[in-house]
Amino acid sequence: MRPAMHSRTRFLLAAGGFIALLLSSLIFLALRRFEDQSALDAFRSAAQERFHALENNVDQTLDNIIALGALYDSSHLVERDEFARFSSRLMDHDRTIQALEWIPRVPHHLRSAFELAARRDGLSSFQITDHPQRGIVKAGERSEYFPILFVEPFQGNETSLGFDLASDPVRREALERSADSGQMVATGTQTGFIVFRPYYRGGVDPLRKQARHDALAGFVLGVFRMKNVVESKTLNVSAVSGLVLAVFDRDAPRGQKLLYPTGAAFDSLADLPKGPIETATIAVAGRTWQVAAYPLSHAFAPARSRSWSILVAELMAIALFATYLHLTLNRKQAIEQTVAQRTEELHAAVDNLERAKKAAEKSETRYRKLLEVSPDAILVTHNLAISMANPAALRLFRVSSAGELAGRQFTEFVKPEFRAVTEDTSLRLHSTETQLQPHEMQLVFGETVVDVEISAASYLDDEGPNVQSIIRDITERKRASDALQVSETRLRGITDSAQDAIIMMDPRGLISFWNPAAEMMLGYRNEEAMGMNLHQLLTPDRYLAAHHAAFPEFLRTGRGNAIGVTVELAARRKDGCEIAIDLSLSAMCLNGAWHAIGIIRDISERKQAEQALRESEENFRQLTENIREVFFVLDPAANHVLYVSPAYEQIWGASRETVYQDPDAWQKAIHPDDLEQTLAAAAIRPEGAAAEFEYRIRTPDGLEKWIRSRSFPVRNPAGELIRIVGVAEEITERKRYEAELIEAREGAEAANLAKSMFLTTMSHELRTPLNAILGFAELLEVEMEDREIHHWDEDVGKIRKAGNHLLALISDVMDLSKIEAGKIEIHAERFDIASLVQDVTASVAPLAAKNQVEVQVISVPAMVNTDRMRVQQCLLNLVGNACKFTHNGRVLVEAHPDSGSGGAWYTVRVTDSGIGIREEDRDKLFGYFTQLDSSSSRKYGGTGLGLAISRRLSRLMGGDITVESVPGQGSTFTFRFPTGAGPQPTLELESKAAAVSSVKEESWQ
Amino acid sequence: MAVILVVEDDAANQELVTRFLKREGHTVFLAVDGKSGVSAAQQHVPDLIVMDLGLPGMDGWEAARQIRSSPTTSHIPIIALTAHALSADVKRASEVGFDGYETKPVVYQRLMKKIGMFVRL
């Protein structure tokens, strides 16, 4: 090579090399700047990606609270186990959840009821508590409380139960903000954050602040682990992307701002180390999080060393490719620029796509999660063909996978009677309407019929109209509702048929229940009474003050003097009159407020009965205290005197107290001689009836009195002797009269006996000398006849006649005396009366012959049972009289049985054609010594006692003798007597008829 | 003729009855009371006894009963002769074993007729 060439080349080379070196340096610098820029861009891009991921994670985390809130909104009342089931399902899906809780709002007046209910629900020592710096104490009194009632997981969180979150100022502020806004509100903790979500009564957000405050029923609450939120697998920051995330709560006070990482030395954005920092803000449930990303220092170093090695390599290549480098530098730069530009554009496009995709995914995730956890079955159908079913739907339809349902017709599962309406509804949802309000129907799965509540909405997608249905299994609810209905019907049956009025009063004092018995008793119909103020309606004015005093205490505690007892009161009826009542009051707590239940019994009748009893007792008392008899009541079991009336004191001469104190005082007063038999008579035997006895007593002042006692057993329905009641009276006077009477009677009897003896003796003593008179007169007659001396015949005859008359007189007087003294006895015997009549008639034949009297007898034979001697005496008297008082005439004797009046009689009629008897003389006929003509005794003979004796004898036999007469023509005496007991003799009718006909033939002309 | 015992306490009646019976040819023993009447009956064993009822000491009913109860005298007919005209007395007499009954005053023909019923004249 030529030196000029060399030097020029060397110059050129040196220049080129210098230029190359310069260029290399420039390239190196440019490359390094580019490399740094690229690293920064990559860092920024990675940081943004992490921010999005974090935001997404936070949203997913908050979805748990949304789902839990939705459970409350749709169910209104969530039981503990349902809460636990739902929560654990959420926690299975999401490990960021540290705890889920239910915080009811408890007003102060319901605090104790709430605590009691929680304890009954299984939280045995539940109470509302505060958690100050250290320890747990019973919550102080506040107007309302927000205690943790449900917490999941339960294990490890027991001590938080009952903790009143409102007792912590930070949480209280968050609670209030959430309640007022209706939104989720977050607040930080040391390791994570808490999110509150309000639940309003009925599951509906009332939208206005004051209404929200009134309707607030509680919060659902979630506690989330910050570490898990940030470090989910998609966000494993430090390990993969060479950058570090820090999260701060912008709104937290200084010193508490750092949320992540825990334990770092900085507390806010400003404290971060110098260097590239990418920041962003995320709105999290009403708070603003600042997120910062900064690179780990070693993440940038390799990028620089690479530029250095490139520089070395370049320098080594410069010599070889200086020119080439020189030539290609511009082009390379252009290419680089284009590449950078394109890369940037691509990044932007990817970012946009990524963001849209994330948003879609986010929505999809949220929706899917709701679908998965929803306790209600959710179906999507297209023209009733099932295209999607959530897990609850699979459970409801008894299938294990969605594939089994896909494409099947929903109506297959609808009970036939609901199919038409279902199809109709489906049509309308596909055309005119977009929503279907919840309605009930029945689905059939094989044999099982399930009651469901179904609501649906339609929406359009590219495949056309779809219907999304939410199906809730309400079998349990129906059963519960049916059971409730049965229970209510039963209760209604009881209260409707109750005899007592049953009424209820609500906490405002208004009537909330009124049964038919109340209508009857108090006069107000149900519709009149319901809603009226109970006490204004029913309580008499005099009781109102007591009621007003007791009512506030009752409202607060459910207690009062009248609660749980039965009191006697008066109630005012609709018509204004008062009735006496028994009121039984009890208290019942419904939804934390006290109601009263009253059972009212009308006791007017009982009151009247009591009044009547009092009056009766007063009458009894007046009676027993005023009668002269002693009235007493004994308790036989206790040998105790229960009552003795005041008359006791006058008769016994001792105070009643002595008897009450000493039951034997009665016994001690009894005369010793009477004691034994009195005690025996007084003893009431178990099965015995009344006892009646008499005895003597000796009073303290020495008097002896006669007492007559009657006592009666009083038994209970079982027949046991429970009382002895009795009356004792003094009978001293009566005893004296009785003694006198007995004496008098004995005297009379003795006199009568003496008279009887006298008569017997008289009869005997008179007859004895008469016997001698008549006997010697007869002897004289006989012996004078023997010697045929007739000079004294007439004189002896007079002696005999007078003697016989005297004898007849004595006999008749004896008879009469005996009749009057009741000494005559009737000696009944059976005999044939007809033959007796014949005998008697025959015996008077001499007299009849003497008076030229024709006697005819017509007799019908009959056996009679009576005193033959007395009948003979009567017949002799009547037939004898007829013959005696008739001269030159006829006597007819008719004798025959006679069944004329009441029983069997026999009649003997004696008819004469004699002098007859005047009517005015007929009554005298039967008197003593009454022969009608005073001269007749001499003319006709006889004692004048015959008819009197005969009539009396006939009456002694139960018969009688009567007379009919026509003076101057004759008389008929009728002797009629009972035939007596015993069979009548059989009569031969023919012979009787013959006898009668013979009478006619012989009847006197 | 028969042997007849008359038991009678009244002297006038003793004489009257004795004279009635002797007039008819009977042999008459007399006793004045029941006791002597019973022993007289034992002693004489008469064909017939006419006995008053109202006797001093042992009365006629008792005397008749004793006469009836003795084998020696039980066969002797006894006729009551008495002023006890009451039916109860008659009944009582027939119960202790009297065979006939005559009330005072004694009627001659009637008494003889009754004795004739027991004693062959």
Image (cartoon, coloured by chain):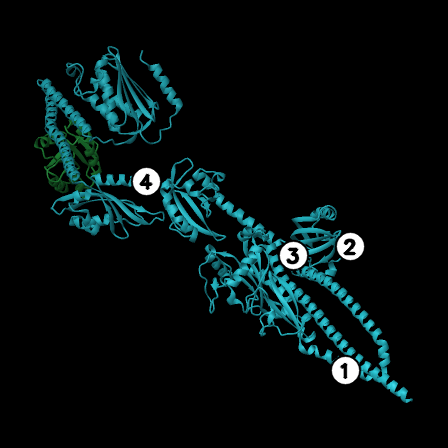
Q: Where is residue A586 drawn, in percent x and y? A: 43, 50
Q: Is residue A289 above or below residue A687?
A: below
Mark 2 / mark 1, whichever is N-terminal: 1
Give the letter of the cyan chain: A
Along the line of sight, the residue nearer the viewer: A556 or A147: A147
Look at mark 1 in the image and give the residue it sits on: A309
Numbered disc in front, either 1 or 4? 1
Numbered disc in front, either 2 or 1? 1
> Quick check: marks 3 and 2 in contact, CB under 8 Å?
no
Residue A376 numbered tag = 3
Residue at (10, 26) in percent of width and height: A773
For the C terminus of chain A, the quadrant is top left
What residue type is disc 4 on? Gln
Cα separation between marks 2 and 1: 57 Å
Q: Residues within 10 Å of mark 3 (few under 14, many from 20)?
A: many
SS for callout 4: helix
What residue type is disc 2 on? Asp
Q: Quadrant of residue A314?
A: bottom right
SS for callout 2: loop
Apparent side of residue A618 relative to residue A404 in the rendered image (left or right): left
Report the chain holding disc 4.
Answer: A
Report the chain holding disc 1.
Answer: A
Mark 1 / mark 4, whichever is N-terminal: 1
On whether disc 4 and disc 2 are found on a single subunit, the reply is yes
Q: Is residue A877 above or below residue A565?
A: above
Q: Is residue B72 above or below residue B113?
A: below
Mark 3 / mark 4, whichever is N-terminal: 3
On whether disc 3 and disc 1 are found on a single subunit, the reply is yes
Residue A611 numbered tag = 4
Cα separation between marks 1 and 4: 126 Å
Look at mark 2 in the image and give the residue it sits on: A462
